[in-house]
Image: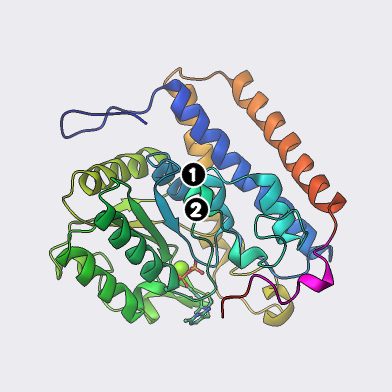
Amino acid sequence: MTQATDDTLPAPGAHERLAMYERMLLIRRVEERLGADFKAGRLIAGVHLYSGQEAVGVGVCQHLGDSDWIASNHRGHGHFLAKGGDVRSMMAEIHAKATGVCKGMGGTMHVADLGRGILGANGIVGGGISLICGAAFSQSLQGSGAVSVAFFGDGASTQGVMSEALNLSALWKLPMVFVCENNLYSEFSRSHTVVAGRIVDRAAAYGVPGVQIDGNDLDAVWEAAGQAVRRARAGEGPTFIEAFTYRMAGHVEAETGFLQGAQYRSSAEVQDWAARDPIARAGARLLELGQATAQQLAAVEVRVAAQVEDAVQFALDSPPPPAAQALEFMFA
Ligand SMILES: Cc1ncc(C[n+]2csc(CCOP(=O)(O)OP(=O)(O)O)c2C)c(N)n1
Ligand SMILES: [Mg+2]
């Protein structure tokens, strides 16, 4: 992690920027593969893909280590990989295999790895916010210096739990960062039909500094997250980041089945956001800064493709969990 002494963070160097590019591309290619495998009937459940939002997860998690915590939402594969989760065991989990990161008992919406500070994906909209507030409280009591980050959507921001977490984290100056990924939709509803006012303004009511950023701009995310993590580590309390982004896939891969052709967003809008693709932008920036060559970017593409293929093969070759395990690992 880059250290800074003044108010502005030094821009990421070539090595760090290329690593973030590779992580973003890994997320994209994993999600594309999962989307294709779902459509081909090779997955047991619908998946909520993170494609298009990669700069947020990666730009934030680049400032975190294994001892820091993240909590995610239903769109959690990207956060899991951004935080350094293992692609093989995530893939095996999504395929419900015994080698999965949760022994194949959780699946797509519960990919978690406590050893890497990943509290997990979460099917309860807003649920991750309360978990991470608890993690931040516990780390604060222990004086560990760890930072806890909640990733959630614009839809989740309307849940009461976000206000409760803002209140407590501000009151107790918890080392926490709120990252709202505003992708303009909550399922099939446009955000402005369910969210009143500006989401970031909710933070101000609790005296929590908030910032709106272009979530498809890796540099903007990197800078905002770096400042927020630094504040949290310095004991200055929580920060709220509202990152505007867009999911390039559907809400859930199963939606083509139940929407039956109904459109809830225009193809012009989708194309407009495709032109602002965060990975293409990060690649162009690497070239523009002379921090990578086109050959290096092509080599990343090859490496990532091999990693995805290896992960899928690992998942397919793995056995399912034994039936006798069905009632184990329950919290009772
Ligand atoms: C408490 C709760 N309410 C409703 C749902 C159904 N649901 C699943 S995802 C979703 C939309 C969430 O939107 P947002 O937070 O913006 O995340 P996005 O899907 O856009 O990434 C809803 C309403 C749920 N899973 N949990
Ligand atoms: Mg949303």
Could you tell me what secondary structure mostly forms the magenta stretch? loop
Disc 2 residue: CB within 8 Å of ligand 1 = yes
Which residue does the numbered mark 2 point to in the structure image?
53
Which residue type carries mark 1? Pro
The magenta region covers 320-329
Q: Residue at x 55, y 39 (%)?
A: 23
From the top left corner, tell me how far across and down residue 42 is, in percent.
83, 62
Q: Dividing the picture into quarters, in which one does residue 240 lie?
A: bottom left
Q: Dividing the picture into quarters, in which one does residue 252 lie?
A: bottom right
Q: Residue at x 38, y 68 (%)?
A: 129
Q: Is residue 322 above or below residue 18?
A: below
Residues at badges 2 and 1 in contact (C-beta under 8 Å)?
Answer: yes
Residue 321 lies within the magenta run: yes
Q: Nearer the viewer, residue 96 or 298?
A: 96
Tell whether 37 sits left or right of 191: right
Where's the N terminus, which quadrant?
top left
Q: CA distance from mark 2 to mark 1?
A: 7 Å
Element carrying mark 2: loop
Where's the C terminus, which quadrant?
bottom right
Specify few, some or many for label 1: CA neighbours under 10 Å numbering under 14, 14-19, or 20 or more: many
Tell whether 28 sits left or right of 193: right
From the top left corner, tell me how far across and down residue 6 is, in percent.
15, 30
Element carrying mark 1: helix
From the top left corner, tell me how far across and down residue 21 is, in percent.
52, 34
